Amino acid sequence: MRILWQIMRPPPDAGRRIQAAHQVWMALALTGLGCCIGVLSLLFAATAYVKLNSTDLLRSYLSSPLLLALNLLPPVLLVWLFYFLSRRAWAGFLGSFLPSIGVTLANYYKIRLRSDPLLATDLRLAAEAGGIVGGYTLDLTWLVWFALGCFLAGLLFSIFLMPQGIRGWRERSFGALSCLALMAVALTGPCFSPALYSKTGSSQLINPWSDVEVFVSKGCIYPFLHSFQDMFPTPPAGYSKAQAAAQMDAYPDSGIPEGQKVSVMGIMLEAFCDLTDFEVLAGQEGVAQVYAPWHELEARSVSGDLLTNIFAGGTVDTEWAFLTGYSQHDDFRSPAGSYVWYLRDQGYQTFGSHPGHGWFYNRQNVNQYLGFEDYWFTENHYGSLVDPVAAVWESDPILVRELEDQLRERSALGPCFSFSVSYQNHGPYADYPTERDGFITPAGSGLSEAGCNILNNYLGGISVTIRAMTGLAQRLEESDEPVVLILFGDHKPWAGNGNSVYTELGAGFDLSSRKGFYEYYSTPYLIWANSAAKEVLGRDFTGDGGDFSPCFLMAEVFDQCGWEGPGFMKLSRQMRAITPMLHARELFWLDGGPTAALDEEDMAFYQQYRQMQYYREQNGR
């Protein structure tokens, strides 16, 4: 024992053999600490998605040396880096444990709450994440307590059993620079390699169509680092700015005839879906009564389903796809081509509302980049009308009232394009009884009490939303101002941690099948026009509009109005004729179901479409 203590804490005049043994001990202990942190991260990754077998997943990590190295190397390098910088083993442990397990915990809870993995782009939404997570219940599982125990054990171990560090500043500087160099090489090489990424992970244990399952099959730290390359604008393969510009010239804009410039009002409804699509709920009288007014409005509209990119969160993906027509896009940091700019150039007033904070998703700036002249948020309008916390529960009647007054005032000055995003019904929904109950009961539905409570609280808000929107349509019908109204949901709602309520409803979420894809990604839309607009445009605005990606929704609106629209929309129509869905995971829709492949000619057109889309996004209006 005395010899071991001498190795761990050798005196300055210790012999060379003791000093050498100490150096070996420190090297093994520091590396071991980093490996333990990496393995702990893998344990969280294996248990994050409750749908997968955690034991089999963990075994797949440990049986793949390459995957193991890719997940363990970052925490090992961080331990060494902070050790060299501070000369303290405990500082090296903290410098690795806190960021590595911090990312791991964020990913663990994000998957458990929203079935969505943590990506590097989420770091830009750190402020928003605080507001979102505040409403959810973060279960302190045994694994979280185990991680806390590991933290304390590792800290005590590094303090008492690794007290002495390397002294020379030259050696420490060389060591720190070497760690940084290895990190840079690892990131730009194996971590960012698409070929390597596709080879890692056990494909037998997961559904390759599921983003979250693909992510967790590769651990946590490694796929998180791999996602950093998506933080920066990346042009499509073979992109040429000059070539894309020349191709866009073949699609000139067409103006809206002066006599047909009716006002257009779009409202994206937070977490709005039609629960009667689920067989278990379709026969529930309380649920049917909630959606009856919506179904009646659908019968007087052009309607269908959007096939979104998102589930239970990420609302701006659907929002910006509608406004721009882009199937994919980078973060908007400067003026970008959009349908809003086109309408503004056509003489439309462009404005909108959101009874939430303007900094959320940076809408206060992005909306300007997309062409809105004026936009109301909590900060500049709704704060005096509704508290942003209360807006989650019942703000749609206020939103509708303000939109009507705004349209009435502005339409006297010319045609309007109004687009708003509701805030009511934002999840999560309480799993305990509230005043919003009685729609579903355990006895009548066969669902659990907690599941019924979640659905009842959701349906209580949705019933208010539907009454507000159908009331808006009724009052617009009585107006002499010609108006086209578009209503659509952004994504399916949260329904219990680990999608527990969806499981009770029988949703399998098999994304390789039509049924599973609709269960996960579909939301309703409708395009309605008042009698004044129908008379001006000479169209009846009823029937099946088809199912498609949100990026095609504005084109459908223009088609129903009889307008040709901007050049990019003409290109978009050709793309939709090939496949009505362009999913963010490079999925398409053929023969009534999702597919990862198009024929050679159609794929060539898709690549051309992507290049022209990127050109339009990066080169302003």
Image (cartoon, helix red, strand yellow):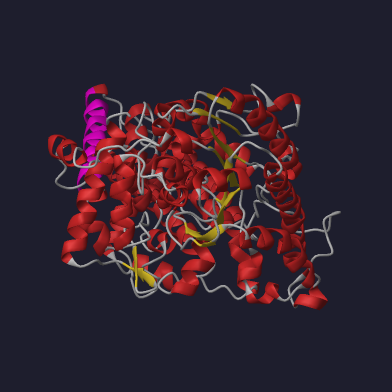
Q: Is residue 284 left or right of residue 353?
A: right
Q: Quadrant of the C terminus?
A: top left
Is residue 508 in view?
yes
Residue at 26 percent of width and 67 percent of height: 597
Q: Is residue 166 above or below residue 189?
A: above
Q: Position of residue 338 (x, y in %)?
A: 38, 36
Q: Is residue 379 left or right of residue 573?
A: right
Q: Is residue 8 left or right of residue 363?
A: left
Residue at 42 percent of width and 51 percent of height: 559
Is residue 25 in view?
no
| Prevailing secondary structure of the magenta residues | helix
Q: Picture quarter containing residue 590?
A: bottom left
Is residue 226 on the magenta stretch?
A: no
Q: Which residues are magenta?
A: 170-189
| Front-lying residue, 548 or 347 | 347
Q: Is residue 526 above or below residue 404?
A: below
Q: Is residue 257 above or below residue 443?
A: above
Is residue 184 on the magenta stretch?
A: yes
Residue at 50 percent of width and 46 percent of height: 537
Q: Picture quarter containing residue 198?
A: bottom left
Q: Is residue 401 left or right of residue 503?
A: right
Q: Picture quarter containing residue 504?
A: bottom right
- Considering every residue shown, the one lying at the far right of the view is 435
| Front-lying residue, 521 or 421 | 421
Q: Position of residue 333 (x, y in %)?
A: 38, 28
Q: Position of residue 283 (x, y in %)?
A: 72, 76
| Front-lying residue, 566 or 453 | 566
Residue at 70 percent of width and 30 percent of height: 405
Numbered-mark total? 0
